[in-house]
Amino acid sequence: MKHYRKELWFEIPARRGFVNITPQVDECLRESGVREGLVLVNAMHITASVFINDDERGLHQDYERWLERLAPHEPVSSYRHNDTGEDNADAHLKRQVMGRGVVVAVTGGALDFGPWERVFYGEFDGRRRKRVLVKIIGE
Amino acid sequence: MKHYRKELWFEIPARRGFVNITPQVDECLRESGVREGLVLVNAMHITASVFINDDERGLHQDYERWLERLAPHEPVSSYRHNDTGEDNADAHLKRQVMGRGVVVAVTGGALDFGPWERVFYGEFDGRRRKRVLVKIIGE
Amino acid sequence: MKHYRKELWFEIPARRGFVNITPQVDECLRESGVREGLVLVNAMHITASVFINDDERGLHQDYERWLERLAPHEPVSSYRHNDTGEDNADAHLKRQVMGRGVVVAVTGGALDFGPWERVFYGEFDGRRRKRVLVKIIGE
């Protein structure tokens, strides 16, 4: 069994944002030499997500507005987590909706994706350096 | 390490619907010959889900009503994704709540499930042919 | 390829609750002898979750309140699933938001976690014995 590990680093300049990280995951897969197996891609921080959806700007605006409706940032004082001095309780909730990470099949040395599947880093508490883990196992 | 891959095809006659695909996943596992390992089952389309829950008709009605409340289809014009000419922005949101896919343990050649766990295909933008990927690795 | 399987049992005294199960998952990993691979941890019941987030009491209160807002327990009669005699339809919905389970990388014999990642059992229909599955594959 082969195995491979890499950390990807991001610093999103705003509180929230979405980044297409498919090229980096593709590059990891190439480096790993794995032809058949599984790729795990997950946020290593609990106020961020890795998810798979469409690389379409309007959709990302819809996600932003929708997540703010489901778990609004303000009022900060409405969350007990923020009593600790944080202001990011909403980010912990938003990340649960979008998910911590994804598992993707590797077939013939490529990510086994449908036509529109792309991997995204979803940031909900940005403006600092944060990490995504890529772990690949297979042969 | 053994590996196995199959695509399952679906065409749901309505916009939304849930299909129990446990028998097809069981059949894939039998074909694979894997006794110990992991099965990944995921929608290859970004307006559909694969999830695990109960095969109970009333619950599926509850999911339908609840997802419509969290991310309503109408008004179509309220979503920026739909400015592209699509009318399925809500489907991209609903799919995030229900998830892209599941990873299931394989033990002794069977899906390692609790008593009520069943795998479902969840369609949120149907009336066309769409695919689910089954990838199995193990020995 | 090595493989390992264990069931963890829980009986939460209230309807809902969160338990940090990271020490038990760590212990499973030690027992497995796996150094490089993947751990799957999932609820075997469809009214419970396994998820990764922060071990912070205020955040858990926020999750509790937020999930009750997204999928309220009462009125029980508002759910078609509860027509079967159950009163736990809301638990099936809450579990979809928080997820069925997680896949975690194993690197150098340890759970490959960011600084604040902890694994939780999330109970939404407690007061009875329920199970979590830990499955580890790797080498």
Image: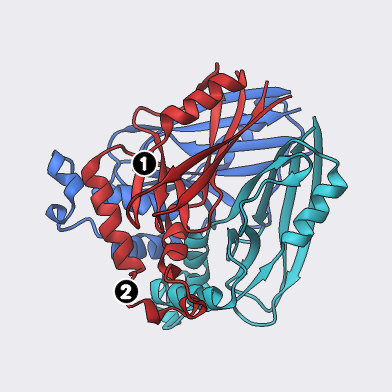
Chain colours: A cyan, B red, C blue
The amino acid at mark 2 is: Glu
Secondary element at tag 2: loop
**Is residue A84 in sight in this rendering?**
no
Picture residue at 29% right of the left edge, 67% below the top: B69
Picture residue at 18% right of the left edge, 58% below the top: C74
> Which residue in the structure is indicated by mark 2?
B74
Label 1 packing within 10 angstroms: few (<14), some (14-19), many (20+):
some
Quadrant where the N terminus of chain A is found in the figure: top right
The amino acid at mark 1 is: Val
Between residue B23 and residue B105, name the one nearer to us: B23
Q: Is residue B113 left or right of residue C102?
A: left
- The answer to whether residue C101 is above or below residue C55 is above
> Which residue in the structure is indicated by mark 1?
B19
Quarter-wise, where is residue B68 in the image?
bottom left
Q: Are marks 2 and 1 in contact (CB under 8 Å)?
A: no
Between residue C18 and residue C77, name the one nearer to us: C77
Between residue C99 and residue B2, name the one nearer to us: B2
Q: CA distance from mark 2 to mark 1?
A: 24 Å
Quadrant where the C terminus of chain A is found in the figure: top right
Picture residue at 48% right of the left edge, 25% below the top: B26
